[in-house]
Image: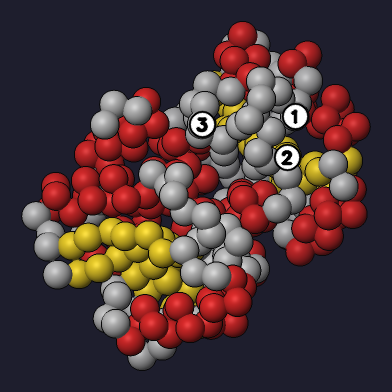
Amino acid sequence: MQVFGLVGNPVGHSLSPPMHEAAYAEHGLDARYVTFEPDPAALDGAIEGAEALGISGLNVTIPFKQDVLGLVEPDDLAARIGAVNTIDFTGERPTGHNTDAGGALRSLREQGVADLNGATAVVVGAGGAGRAVAFALADAGSTVHVVNRTVERATDLAAAVPGAAGHGLDALGELVPAADVLVNATSVGMDEDATPVPADCLHSDLVVLDAVYSPLETRLLRDAAAAGATTVDGAWMLLYQGAEAFERWTGLEAPIDAMNDALRTNLRGDR
């Protein structure tokens, strides 16, 4: 039996296990997906132990995405982003990858954006998710504007992303009306009915991705739909980053429908 898993702290809320195990069942794989919650001080030993035990692959979540960089061989994208969310143990040394970037791009493309090359994109948030999204969009040919509550974090990230610019939140009123794509990469909207973007900035030619997936319909997405924009909920990004990890680990095509059904069933609580 192959073992895959998720390392983070905390991980009890994760929806990755049912999503990945639905993929294993669809392909008839003898595999399990389990969660690990090591003490942050024991992360080095946890990764070494996973390799020694023959675990095939790990996803990595908060707060370890940056900490594992020095414990694996990151690919170019993960090194540029500065974060790893997927580890592959099949080589001579564990390799690190960032599937958040691909998950964001695929969710946009599959749900409404035909071509990101030449698009103008606004990314709200300069944390781990914001970094992955900003690099992904720039690599796809978009002009990226990073907006963050702390302006210095926005400008620091923009300096690392080709062609990007950093701004404070007060720039949203100017940037969003001229944008083609808007991504909320913050947690605003998760714990309260709030939005990081004023509703009067939104317009019908905009595609809006909210990385928050609980709730699925955030205030930002409701406001965007009311403005006639195309909306993409955060479960799509979660789905496609998981699908990319599955494909990297197994070499098989991810069964998107089965994974999506499992993810959304668990989000609704129909267990």
Residue 143, position in %: x, y? Answer: 72, 46
Query: From mark 1 to mark 2, how far is it between C-alphas?
Result: 8 Å
Residue 163, position in %: x, y? Answer: 77, 55
**Closer to the N terminus: mark 3 or mark 1?**
1
User: Circle 3 sits on which residue?
Assistant: 214
Query: From mark 3 to mark 1, how far is it between C-alphas?
Result: 16 Å
Q: Residues within 10 Å of mark 1 (few under 14, many from 20)?
A: some
Q: Residue furthest left?
A: 28
User: Circle 2 sits on which residue?
Assistant: 124
- Residue at point 27% right, 37% down? 262
Q: Secondary structure at mark 2?
A: strand
> Identity of the amino acid at label 2?
Val
- Residue at point 49% right, 69% down? 38
For residue 12, side relative to residue 121 (left or right) = left
Q: Nearer the viewer, residue 45 or 256?
A: 45
For residue 24, side relative to residue 74 (left or right) = left
